[in-house]
Image (cartoon, rainbow, N blue to C red):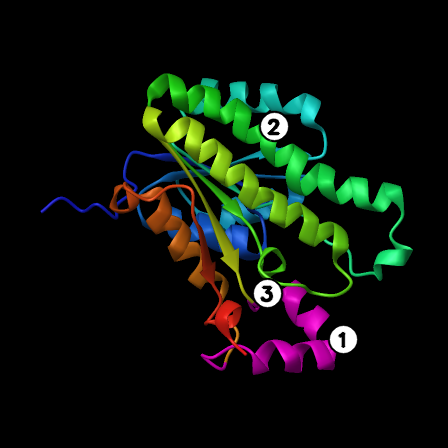
Amino acid sequence: MENKFSLAGKVALITGGGTGIGFDMAKCMLASGANVIITGRREAVLQEAINSLGAGAFYFVHDMADVSATPSLVADIIQSHGKIDILVNNAGINMKRPAIEVSNDDFAQIIQVNLNAVFVLSREVGKHMLERKSGSIIMISSMAAYYGIDRVAAYASSKSGLYGLVRVLASEWSAHGVRVNAIAPGFIETAMSKTAMNSDPDRKHKAMDRTPMGYFGKPEDVAWTAVFLASDAAGYITGVSIPVDGGNSIGF
């Protein structure tokens, strides 16, 4: 029987793939047979990442906020790798601050990186996928799109907007072979999240209390879900947001 979970022969583009969840997604997609391209702003971090990932991993330096450079990024990747089968919009920024202290510029910056830039990259990659009548686009959302979390007004707005974008793009593109979905990670143990949680014990306790499985997830939990959504095994799945959260979104 054909292995529908294989990504052999596919080319995946993962933004923010040098660290954290993005790095684990790159690792798992490589293990599943794909060639993987990661992007980020810091070349030294990207170089270290592909050295660790090994054969089949490549990088391009790109600042998501600079949407004027996005079309040339996509063109360069297609020229050097021939195609893009999978796009994972993983890169994003956050800010934890009471809403009344968030300036117009603060709010706009997060919307620019987490939503506007994601749309632009998805649009440019989408043009290529639509021509080929094949592709999988995955947005990385958040629990902040499922329920209210204090002090993340801009971040929650951007991640909620992503799911609206998923549904529209899926509606427009799925009949042409391009599937669009989202993953909403729950509380995942990364270096950044550990620092944040350890500095806010009350929030950590609240998060754990409403997670039925009783522990925080690992980056690879999100990564393998991305592999599934990118694969032919998920060929009839589009327009959805899948929580990878140990039940947090339904916990009480």
Amino acid type, callout 2: Val
Figure check: 98 above or below 90: below
Q: Residues within 10 Å of mark 3 (few under 14, many from 20)?
A: some
Which residue sits at x=49%, y=82%?
214
What amino acid is labelled 1 in the image? Ser
Earlier along the polypeptide chain: callout 2 or callout 3? Answer: 2
Give whichever of 156, 232 is nearer the camera: 156
Which residue type does callout 3 highlight?
Thr
Figure check: 61 above or below 77 = below
- Residue 230 bears which disc, if any? none
Instruction: Pinpoint residue 104: horizontal percent, then vertical percent.
Output: 87, 42
Q: Which residue is mark 1?
A: 199
What element does badge 3 sit on?
A: loop
Disc 2 is placed on an element classified as: helix
In the rendered structure, find residue 120 and report the number of the disc placed on it: 2
**Is 139 situated above or below 176?**
below
